[in-house]
Amino acid sequence: MSTEFQLQDNEQQLEAVFLYMGILDAYDAVGTELIGPNVLDEHVLPRMVYYVQEFLPEIFSGQTSADALVGELKVFLADFHRKVENAQTSGSTEGLTMQEIWKLRAAIFGYESVFIDILGDAAIKDYVFIRISDILAAYLPEYLLDPGFSLAEKLDGYANYIREHGFVKYARTKVQGDKITVATNGCAFSRIHESDAYQNLNVRFCPWGMIGSAIVSAHEGRGTTLKSSLFTTMGSVSEIETQ
Amino acid sequence: MVHLHASLRMIREIFLIDRSVLQYHYSRDQSSYDDDKAVLSSGFLSAIQDFSTHTRSDALESFSTGNEYFLYLQCPDSSRVLVGVFDRIAPENLAREAMEKIMGFLRDFKMPETEGKQLLPEEKERIQDHIERISIQLFSNEQLSSIVIETLERRSDIPLAFLVDSNDKSIITSFSRPKPLFKQTQVREFLLVHSTLNKVLESLEIGKRYSYFIIESDDYSVAACNGGRLLSVASGAMRIPKENVYEAATTICYADSFEEEIALTSDETLVGKLIYSTEGRISEKRGKDVTQKAIVFISTLIKSIDSMFKSLTRRPYKRFFARTSGQGDWCITLISTSGMTLFELHKLPSL
């Protein structure tokens, strides 16, 4: 997998990993805001083990005690954060592969599932996604924040960006009044769609839609929410709405 | 009680003397200090000042020795004198600011009126604690920074905050959750609002600095406090009440005191009104006469507030409120709606 999706440009690869990791950081920050400073340790990690284990059994040592699994998951997330921070400091993606980003995707799914579980669908749409979009805007590359470009131009640029760098084989965005659509196909992380843990959930959100929502929010200066993501075997269609 | 390493403490001793009688004494080595020595020292310090006043016809303001220097500060409308002893390496402008802050704190403190009567131990401890907070605030950026970060890590409502040194415009510390939420440009945008607001107050002939300002949209609030050397900015999470964000900004300004509650304005306090169009032109003018220069500064302020708020929250601002320090003071409000901005100047009643 790591060779199939290996990105060409070091700097842009880092930029993409940073942006993707922003989703995990934003979940963490919003969890702290809504539940408290110990949200990760006390509420998220114990519930997240099940979802992450579905996709990343390799990070666990095979121990069965819930506490031991939580401890291992915590170490994995801390190590991953450190790895990305080191990559940013050194300006090199050495040691970071698409396999690593795949792990990140699984962790994001874990967060999302736990949040839906703890907070409920309404809180996710009324608060969490609006706030995540605002936080994620701090991770966007400068050109996606430039007021000199129209929203359609920025979304087109974003679609090209994820396509050209191997995250998806196809991406399209559409702006129609207050409704924005982000559609992707041939996604590098779509194997997550096949698992039972994923299919058993009624509500799921695509990270490409979440990043699209951040672009809209930063451009419009208004609260933006990822209304829904419809998943296909290899892709998704996300609907974004501004308030 | 604040504990700190002695080497970081530039304030060695503080004496509060009233007509040669020692009312309060602080020493950074409190545990080993001899009370008799403090009484003796205060007698010498008063005698030196008396000598200067009576034989040289000039009030003594400072003197120095090899390792330390002494600053005198007369309490306004009182016979009390504050004497501070500082490490030689302590910057004098900060030492003078420390003296003003300590004097401000002690001014409100009720000292025993009967000679020989002592302050209660808990009162002494409160004063000592405050002096040590001022010491950290002015002389130890490192400790101040860790205190601010620890404070904000414990709360969940303030994802972004920073402290700036107004003397050299440097960032003392910043806190953000997650880290990329903080950008250097936010500090630049804030400093622009800070200096533009000062220009507005100057051009309106309000001879005071601002104490705090608050910027709001429907979802977000940002508060900034002006503590003299320290300027603090706190940005709240979505839908956090402005009162909480203001309280956070005052807390991280550390040893400075601010009004406990945000001031209220009404039609009775209104003294002047301007309406700006989106192009920055005046479409209506009422009340206090405002100079052309002030009109230009206000229009720059409107622009800089919007930029600062967008850099912190990604939203255009809707309301701005600023208040000057002290009693009988001034407030500035700005309300932004599509197509116009309403500027109001209020004079708060003296208590």
Image (tube, grey):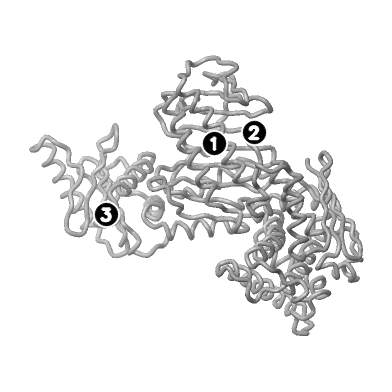
Q: Secondary structure at mark 3?
A: strand
Q: Which comes sooner in the sequence, label 3 or label 2?
A: 3
Viewport quadrant of the C terminus of chain A:
top right
Q: Can residue B111 be seen? A: no
Report the number of numbered marks. 3
Q: Position of residue A98 (x, y in %)?
A: 73, 72
Quadrant of res B38: bottom left
Answer few, some or many: residues within 10 Å of disc 3's Cα (few below 14, many 20 plus, some between 14 and 19).
many
**What's the amino acid at mark 2?**
Lys
Q: Which comes sooner in the sequence, label 3 or label 1?
A: 3
**What's the amino acid at mark 1?**
Ser
Q: Position of residue B48 (x, y in %)?
A: 14, 46
Q: Which comes sooner in the sequence, label 2 or label 1?
A: 1
**What's the amino acid at mark 3?**
Phe
Q: Is residue B112 left or right of residue B321?
A: left
Marks 2 and 1, how far apart at CA: 13 Å
Task: Look at discs 3 and 1 and give the one toward the viewer.
Answer: 1
The answer to whether A74 is drawn above or below residue B148 in the figure is: below
State the residue in front, B39 or A4. A4
Please give the residue where the numbered disc 2 appears in the rendered image. Answer: B318
Please give the residue where the numbered disc 3 appears in the rendered image. Answer: B86
Q: Position of residue B278 (x, y in %)?
A: 62, 26
Do discs 3 and 2 belong to a common subunit? yes
Q: Position of residue B106 (x, y in %)?
A: 35, 43
Q: Mark 2 near mark 1, Cβ–Cβ under 8 Å?
A: no
Rendered image: mark on residue B304: 1
